[in-house]
């Protein structure tokens, strides 16, 4: 007796993916007519008979949204950005009667391998992925699959559904604020250049200086990693070059920068003014309170879920690409009140 063919085998014979075969078998949209005809021809020639029980399950929704965070667990639980983001995601899932499943990874290989396994088992209806590094193969894999996903963070590929804050504009207005206060030697502590948000915030810094005719000094640009420890080390290095002010690309790094300046006897904002980015709760609790760019982190999570649900209901075309505005919140660390 000949063993029953699987969807994978039908896909190999037709030159398509398993997911495409599944869509044809279950009479789902999103398959080109010529591809559908080719799959149906293979099915007819092989006498393939879909399993009724499996077919029934395939047409059902799990009511589960997966959240992929391609960071180590340590970063997840120490970076205050993620709890706020997850709060918004969970709130939106609850409001729409979806469960949330969290997937954490330590390496890129883990990301792709596990994503393939959970996709084949249909453990979720769609995925949210937090901002990955540039060229992450996980995104390329998801694009080549039929998995519906939204990236929480900008992606240069116009086919990727994404929701993000306007990182360039936020950084630009932060640096322009410092220039208007009279500062010219303005340093920056960036995030890792493998991350698009960090790249765009650096670009905003550079553009603001260039538009005001201020020469960019390489010694005043320090690259870090969004952590307090990284901010401490970067600020320690920058102090050797005596900046008048500094734009720090995250509140977490700003806490480290403040500590470094205290340890070196530098007063903020009397000796060096500081503007940060995020407006997390810790920004108000810092000493001095941080002037910072407010990005709507919780709203990003909510919109990510709402966008994904819209895609699940109405299809992936056209791609959804949502950029939210940011807002500069002026507090003590920039010294605005003392220079007015």
Image: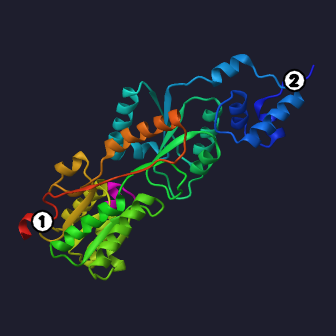
Image vertical order of residue 264 relative to residue 122, above or below: below
- Which quarter shows the N terminus? top right
User: Is 217 displayed left or right of 311 in the figure?
Assistant: left
Tell me if 277 is positioned left or right of 154 in this view: left
In the rendering, at what x and y percent does residue 68 appear?
49, 41
- The residue at the point 68 percent across, 29 percent down is 27
Q: Quadrant of the C terminus?
A: bottom left
Residue at figure coordinates x 61%, y 29% from the top left: 122
Farthest top residue in view: 53
User: Label 2 belongs to which residue?
Assistant: 3
Whole-percent x, y for residue 301 in the image: 38, 41
**Is residue 61 toward the left or the right of residue 298 in the image?**
right
Residue 318, above or below 327? above
Q: Could you say where residue 302 lies in the image, as x and y percent from the top left?
A: 36, 38
Q: Residue at x 52, y 56 (%)?
A: 158
Q: Is residue 258 above or below residue 29?
A: below
The reply to whether residue 256 is visible in this rendering is yes
- Residue topped by disc 1: 335
* Tag in front: 2 or 1: 2
Residue 8 magenta-highlighted: no
């Amino acid at each position: 007796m000949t063993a029953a063919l699987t969807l994978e085998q039908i896909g190999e014979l037709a030159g398509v993916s398993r997911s495409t075969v599944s869509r044809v078998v279950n009479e789902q949209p999103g398959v080109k007519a010529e591809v559908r005809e080719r799959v149906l021809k293979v099915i007819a020639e092989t006498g393939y008979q879909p399993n009724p029980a499996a077919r029934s399950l395939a047409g059902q929704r799990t009511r589960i949204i997966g959240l992929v965070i391609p960071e180590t667990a340590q970063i997840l639980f120490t970076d205050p950005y993620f709890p706020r983001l997850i709060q918004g995601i969970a709130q939106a899932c609850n409001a729409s009667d979806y469960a949330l499943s969290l997937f954490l990874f330590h390496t890129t290989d883990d990301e792709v391998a596990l994503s393939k396994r959970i996709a084949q088992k249909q453990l979720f209806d769609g995925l949210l992925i937090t901002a990955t590094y540039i060229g992450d193969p996980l995104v390329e894999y998801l694009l080549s699959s039929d998995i519906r996903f939204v990236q929480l963070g900008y992606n240069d590929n116009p086919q990727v559904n994404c929701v993000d804050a306007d990182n360039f504009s936020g950084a630009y207005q932060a640096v322009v604020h410092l220039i208007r206060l009279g500062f010219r030697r303005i340093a920056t502590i960036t995030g890792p250049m493998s991350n698009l948000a960090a790249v765009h915030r650096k670009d905003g810094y550079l553009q603001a200086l260039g538009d005001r005719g201020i020469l960019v000094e390489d010694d005043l640009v320090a690259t870090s990693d969004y952590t307090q420890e990284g901010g401490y080390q970067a600020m320690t290095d920058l102090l050797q070059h005596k900046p008048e002010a500094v734009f720090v690309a995250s509140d977490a790094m700003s806490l480290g920068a403040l500590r470094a300046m205290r340890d070196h006897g530098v007063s903020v904002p009397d000796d060096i003014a500081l503007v940060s980015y995020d407006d997390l709760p810790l920004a108000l609790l810092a000493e001095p309170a941080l002037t910072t760019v407010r990005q709507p982190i919780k709203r990003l999570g909510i919109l990510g879920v709402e966008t994904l649900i819209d895609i699940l209901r109405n299809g992936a075309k056209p791609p959804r690409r949502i950029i939210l505005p940011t807002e500069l919140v002026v507090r003590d660390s920039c010294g605005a009140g003392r220079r007015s």
